[in-house]
Amino acid sequence: MPNSVVDADVIFKELKTNSISEFFRKNSQMLGYSGKVRSLTTVVHEYVTNSLDACEEANILPEIIVEVKQIAESKYSVKVTDNGPGIPTKIMGRVLATVLSGTKFHRYMQQRGQQGIGGSGCTLFSLITTGKAIHVRSGTGRGAYECDLSIDIKSNRPLITNMVEIDKAFKGLEIYGEFGEVKYESSDHGIYEYLRRTALSNPHATIRLIDPEGKSFNFIRSVTEMPTRAKASKPHPLGIGTNDLLEFAHASESRKISSFLVETFSRLSQNKVEELKGIVGELDFDKDPRKLTWDEAEKLVNSFKQVKWIAPDLDSLSTIGKTQIEATIKNILNPQFMSITERKPKVFRGGIPFVVEAGIAYGGSAGKTTEVGSQGVLIRFANKVPLLFDGSVCAITSAVNDIQWKRYGIKEFDQEPISVMVNVSSVYVPYSGVGKQAISQEMEIIEEIKLAVMDCARGLQRYMSGQKNKSIQTSKYNTIMKYVSQLSENLSEITDLKKADIEKELKALIDSRYKKLLEVEAAEEAKAQEEAEGEEEEDVGSAEEE
Amino acid sequence: MPNSVVDADVIFKELKTNSISEFFRKNSQMLGYSGKVRSLTTVVHEYVTNSLDACEEANILPEIIVEVKQIAESKYSVKVTDNGPGIPTKIMGRVLATVLSGTKFHRYMQQRGQQGIGGSGCTLFSLITTGKAIHVRSGTGRGAYECDLSIDIKSNRPLITNMVEIDKAFKGLEIYGEFGEVKYESSDHGIYEYLRRTALSNPHATIRLIDPEGKSFNFIRSVTEMPTRAKASKPHPLGIGTNDLLEFAHASESRKISSFLVETFSRLSQNKVEELKGIVGELDFDKDPRKLTWDEAEKLVNSFKQVKWIAPDLDSLSTIGKTQIEATIKNILNPQFMSITERKPKVFRGGIPFVVEAGIAYGGSAGKTTEVGSQGVLIRFANKVPLLFDGSVCAITSAVNDIQWKRYGIKEFDQEPISVMVNVSSVYVPYSGVGKQAISQEMEIIEEIKLAVMDCARGLQRYMSGQKNKSIQTSKYNTIMKYVSQLSENLSEITDLKKADIEKELKALIDSRYKKLLEVEAAEEAKAQEEAEGEEEEDVGSAEEE
């Protein structure tokens, strides 16, 4: 055997370096391009997400038109037009045709897109399935142009061709692309459902879908106010690791570690620096931050954990909002009952702020009707973007499956006409994959989702037990009433009073007694509920009000 | 509102380009670094996979030692030593400290690692959780050295320090790294289970684990032959898309399209070129392949689909092998019954070859014992590498869940002492994520896994119904035997023969009759089985023997 051993030089001579474009060309399923229906939904998802983000930053109420046409078997065109700010000519190539370029991920701020992959991923997918470039028209108000855009896969660089100026009256962005290996379907994983859910979580947007048959579906905005603007903010000291701190320090322009800390982090005042000095021990806070070592940074991060902090700045979070969830659920599901909860913001991994909103709808168009009866439906969102795929690995699914639904008067989640919607918002959503279709199973996030959904479920429980009591009461009432006529007749014979009079009085008596009974029960229930809620209030974390 | 509209230039001024290292630094969960236990298993998985691949290429029977030590709370060191070919000095940085560099993915060949991410991912994870470099010792036989290795995240370039030559007697590779945010646990997702399963699918490897308590576990090789070597091969015409064909053409050194086709693809002879010419129509096969257009390439790819081809070359696939699976299942699970199937290679997406092996073990240490009784266990492999995570999105799980186990005499998969193992081998395994823990749900792969497992399940069914018949037969036999003694006594009284003689003869009679009965039944069953299998033989694809 030793004779046939192959030398390392031979083994490694075929080594090659891949560009990130090349990597995703070969693994496009990792970007969400797996399966024909999912692939088409992914394209629309990326473009609509970008449009919503851009409109939000530009402070424009979004109007988005999605037009899908079939070109051939398994080949469709997608055109997405928005009224947003447009994209300036010189950065077009980076935003839509360079993978990992054009990211704003370094900003500490909640946004739908994060990675600088989505839009360029579509351009790549168009190229590898049809060989075509995408066509873009953009108007920023000061000028407008159109061009063809593709990617040089080997170098991960944009290829821009046929650039021409157009009428500067055109304002916004229009992207047209052709895609192969795709299919339009009106299933739970299709574009219609995706846009319906997007409308649900973005009530300020008007979205129009023109499907391949030319049919038009309009999701009209239900509010005309922009959502509360998420602000870029400084990171919280509890949200960063040693490596993050080092990176900030080495890029800092501050002269001293002390001023670097104050300038870089939220909640970190000069007073806090003094406090930290007492804890860290051997560290020169006057030192150049660019010379901070790992050990020193580690000491600092450990000291952060020993200090009491005000909770993270929450301006960086933007929720859908209770009223708006209510309006859209009513609008879309028209349920018999609904209950909405917005939790207070929390942190995960020590200091990354996030907030969970949840809603439960019961009856009406809630849930899903199948051959075997009603079924629960889970509607997942992250930063207001619908998540249609990979539900089985998502923190939201875990949380909802963890709940003992029987406690809340629900047989099984998948046997009732119930829709549960959950939106997790954060400056950093820890997606489980590059395709951003599931939230990684972080314990703190799962716990918080559970609390939110359980809170809604308690509302549902009250409603269900009310329904149950009501039906018991009603049947008692009906039983008594059934005998009233007979009894009145008998009494009339004995007392010589008119049957009609006796019957009237008896009915009034029963009615008033029944009403009182209901009031007493309602009061008892309310009291029990209050007590139960009191017990469940839990600590917000190591937040301190200064 | 128009006054407050924000201009595109302002919006996009904060755009930034991320290096791929930076991207994975921020999204390390996508590489498998989520959760403390999983993160530590991921490190071992990456190093052991690389060692096995390198030994296989060098034709060396692998001996791998994995040593895990606890350094502090949530901080461990991992040292992996192998007897492989080592890594030449000048490419060390690319292999272990540059994300997406050092890939051999362009080769059309089955290998465990694929992407040029794993090893560098460990270096990155060590850096971001401990700030440390990894330490490498490597000997190629001609020379040996050691060095510290880290990544410059901003540029995705290696940082090599403290490089020194060492005694050239050292042969192989030793990697030592320290990792934070990790935890050693002996659960189903821990390192012990990972290595146990690796041993199961790599019976030619000897693997030793030294756990943080210093305890040593040895998985000794059960065979001393190298597995059949997977060969790099040319791609099959049915396995490529238009984009692939264009890429090959534009990089070709052939002078004509016709010679380019013959040289690039397997099964594509000059005769086939003539056949294609008749189908494609307007295309000059004497044209320079570097000038091939998308439309021409698309025509060619379509014409490929109209020709009959010999099935893809299978030298590029390497399986574990039926005998070896049997040996390791016996070794590790010692079941009452087992059934192994190796399917013939098939293709997915038109022409990418893959092959499925499956085994079922019943009884013994198969399955899992829980509080509520036995439970089925699914042991997943891709290219002989155990997949411990993300089972819920894996094609193997889907396939096994799709099977109607009741048909095979199994109550429910999760209520029996049963282990099902499946290994999918391919030159290109379509992983669902960068962390390579699940196989994307391609229909053709799912179908093939189902057929493999169902084949094993039929073996199990025969065994189960045999067990059942046997127990019915045995009880009949016992019932008859019970009366033999009484009957012999009565006959003895009537016939004046000795009771003992009568009893002896009667028992012999019953025994022989019972034996014959069993033989007849077994023959009938075998015949029925043969017929059933005949019906199930399905087509291998559009393969043609020339």
Image (spheres, coloured by chain):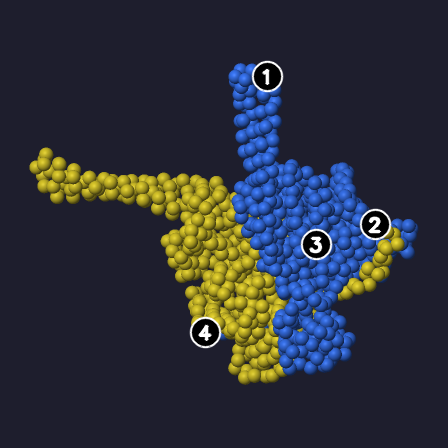
Chain colours: A yellow, B blue
Q: CA distance from mark 2 to mark 4?
A: 65 Å
Which of discs 2 and 3 lies nearer the camera? The answer is 3
Q: Quadrant of residue A116?
A: bottom right
Dots 1 and 2 on the same chain: yes
Please tell me which of labels 3 and 1 falls first in the chain: 3
Residue A340 can be seen, yes or no: no
Mark 3 — residue?
Answer: B383
- Identify the amino acid type marked 1: Lys
- Give me the residue at 45% from left, 58% from top: A325
Q: CA distance from mark 2 to mark 3?
A: 21 Å
Q: Nearer the viewer, residue A151 or A259?
A: A151
Mark 2 — residue?
Answer: B83
**Does the CB distance between marks 1 and 2 fall below 8 Å?**
no
Mark 4 — residue?
Answer: A214
Which of discs 1 and 2 lies nearer the camera? The answer is 1
Left or right: B379, with B153 as reference point: left
- Give me the residue at 60% from left, 33% from top: B515
User: What percent of the width, then of the height, locates residue A508?
Assistant: 20, 43
Mark 1 — residue?
Answer: B498
B18 w.r.t. A419: above or below: below
- Identify the amino acid type marked 4: Gly
- Identify the amino acid type marked 2: Asn
- Crowd class of label 2 (few under 14; some 14 to 19; many from 20; radius 10 Å): many
Q: CA distance from mark 1 to mark 4?
A: 98 Å
- Crowd class of label 1 (few under 14; some 14 to 19; many from 20; radius 10 Å): few
- Give me the residue at 74% from left, 52% from top: B49
User: What percent of the width, then of the height, locates residue B200?
Assistant: 71, 45
Please tell me which of labels 1 and 2 falls first in the chain: 2
